[in-house]
Structure formats: structure tokens, C-alpha cells
Amino acid sequence: MIPYGRQDINQADIDAVIEVLQSDYLTQGPKVPEFETAVASYCFARYGVAVNSATSALHIACLALGIGQNDIVWTSPITFVASANCALYCGAEIDFVDVNPLSGNMCPDALAIKLEHAAQIGKLPKALIPVHLCGHSCDMVAISTLAKQYDIKLIEDASHAIGGCFQGHKMGSCHYSDITIFSFHPVKVITSAEGGMAITNDLELAEKMRLFRSHGISRDVVSMERPNEGAWYYEQHLLGFNYRMTDLQAALGLSQLARLDEFVATRNTLAGAYDKAFCHYPIVPVNPIEDSVSARHLYVIRLNDAQKRRQCFEHMRSKNIWVNVHYFPVHLQPYYLKQGFKEGDLPRAEAFYQQILTLPLYPSMTNIEQNSVIKTLLEVL
Ligand SMILES: *Cc1c(COP(=O)(O)O)cnc(C)c1O
């Protein structure tokens, strides 16, 4: 079976985890802060807050930005459900901005029109969550300009995108945003088994996210609200969660981070080979925006119609090539339909969904595997 994506674990990764298993701390030890510092400095950002998933990172990012009841958050409909769910966890309302028909990323023109209308009716969002689909950067210049104009907070869901950059700014630099989120799930670009991180340049946001990550508990003597009872004493300042990453995960993440640039280079080489193989066929690769480097988490193609897409999907699956579709539009999920969304709300996202197919792409993919994917796809066309 050729999967659409898979982790790449080497002996150094294994040794790093074993070392932690034999140490004094399985969790709340030195590896988590070491991983946070390493990711933040890789991205040229100030603070990293490691958590047990990107979903948790999205949740605490929303909470740290003060999102709650009576607030509205906008994201992209072509994403994993977590990008939208985080707003609902906070009791806020969610809405979606339609996508660019070629990239599937949040469309700045659709955003501008929706903002203008929302301003007129007094329903502006408090935060925007653009998603860098496939690892391809959104047009962050246009999106952040609009966000500033309307005084809206920006969280980048860069779950697909660590290792990439846009106009010379590393993903996670938070050059355009308040907070950037990464996922380290095994199908993503680097892994810590489960895990995620929120990156920010704002100390106050970082400290709030640290509180939300661990029960809202602080041991910081300076911020005590009551008299310090002694060295055992800690205070709970808000209602937080246990979203902590373990040291085992952080050690794996650190070891993987050392291999990130190599992974991204390999992914781009494989993507280039796909592009070349398809250039004379009615297959349109979803390509990165100009002046960017994509981390290439996913290699997605567009086929001209839904029937062709289904044929390709079924033929390839029958040959044990585990193609996939990223993503079914979030607003059409039964749960979201019950919130009042309906078919036709986001026509370009719905049309994009009908055309897309995710082909296998992972660093350890061999030429033989890739050629078999290409050959099997072209058999249908
Ligand atoms: C994978 C993913 C998430 C959630 O990541 P977890 O680490 O599994 O919680 C969120 N957003 C997007 C776009 C993703 O692809």
C-alpha cells in the first residue's frame, strides 16, 4: 500500500526518545522548553508554547486573544474541522470566507467584500484564522492588511506549513499575525506523535497560553494574587486545561526539527517530479503562491470534473494507492449544517472540493513508488 503521507523516523529519533525514557522526567522536564525555543528560533519568532495537539494550540490561541461568547471568528471552509471548532469551544460564532478557486486558500477579495458587509451590519469578526492549505502560504500581505484595517486578530493555522516561507518570512515568524499554530501529527511535515505548538512574538499572549495549557496554574512569585504561602504554593488564575506536551514527544519533535529542511527539500523535489509528469494532461496541480517556499505537506491536483475525480480515486484505491481528498468543506459537515450552514453558502469552496485529489507524498517515497502513482493516475485519463 502506498499511503498519502507517512512519518519518517530514523535511529536518531528513536535514540532521542529512549534517552528521555531513561531520564528523570517523562513530562514537565527540560525537553519541552528546549523544543519550544528551538522551534521559535527556527521561525525567527520569540515564543513557542508546546501543547498536546494543534487543536489544543488553536483553542488556547483563541482564549488568549480573548475570544468568547458574542464574538465571531472567520476561517476557511477547506480545512480540517479543528480550524473552525476552536471558535465554538470558546462559545464564539464561526463563519467561513470563500476560497481562491485555484489554491483553495482564503481569498483576500472574498474577505474584503465580506468584511465590508459585516462592518455595515455591525458583525465584524474578532479573529481570522487563515489556513495554509498543503503548506502553500495564503496571501498574507493582503489578508493582514485587511485585518489591520478592521482591527481584527490573526491566527495562522500553519498545521501544514512548518518549514516554508512567504516573501522571505518563515512560517511561524508571526510577521503577519498574532499567533501561528503548528501540528506535529504523524502525517504532517515533522512529528512528535501527537503534538502542536503556538508561536507568538507577544509575551503577554505567550504567558496566557502557558496558563491555559496547564489548568490556569501559575508558580510565578511575581504574579501571585495572595500572600505566598511557601515553596509548595501555586495559584490558579483562570480556568485552564491539561494540554501539556510530554518530554518524550518534545524529544522526538526536536530530533525531527533537525531534519525539517531536508524533509521540505525532498517533498519539493517529489512535487516537482509530479508537476513535470502531469504538464501535458488535464491535471492542474494546486501550486504555491509566488515568492514563497511551500513545506508541501500535501500534493493536491485538480481534475476538470467530479466524475473524473471519483474515477481516479477509485481506480487508484483499487491498485492500493491510498489517494485522499483534502478537504470536504467544513460548513457542509452534518454538525455545521445543524448550526445553520447550507449547500451553496460557499460556492467556490464547494466547487474546489469536487475537483481535488491528494496524491501520495512523503520524504521516504521512492522513485518506483512515485512512478507507479503517476502511471496509475494516467491510466484513467
Ligand atoms: C491536522 C490539522 C489540525 C489539527 O492538528 P492536530 O495536531 O491533529 O490537532 C488543524 N488544522 C489543520 C489545517 C490540520 O491539517
Image (tube, grey):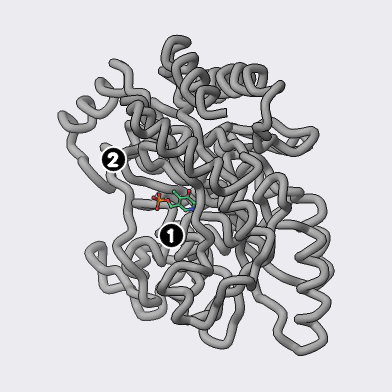
The residue under the point 46% across, 48% down is 197
**Label 2 residue near ligand 1, CB within 8 Å:** no
Quadrant of the image for the C terminus?
Answer: top right
Marks 1/2 in contact by CB < 8 Å: the verdict is no
Helix, strand or loop at disc 2?
Answer: helix
Q: Is residue 144 above or below residue 65?
A: above
Q: Residue at x 66, y 62 (%)?
A: 154
Residue 57, position in %: x, y? Answer: 45, 57
Q: Is residue 19 left or right of residue 43?
A: left
Q: Residue at x 82, y 61 (%)?
A: 109
Residue 247 is tagged as 2
The residue pinned by badge 1 equals: 210
- Let me know if residue 66 appears in the view: no
Indicate the secondary structure of the residue bearing disc 1: helix
Q: Residues within 10 Å of mark 2 (few under 14, many from 20)?
A: many
Three-letter amino acid code at disc 1? Arg
Q: Is residue 332 above or below residue 349?
A: below
Give the residue drawn at x 48%, y 39%: 311
Q: Which mark is residue 172?
A: none
Foreground pick, 13 / 221: 13
Give how far apart the Cα atoms at labels 1 and 2 are.
16 Å
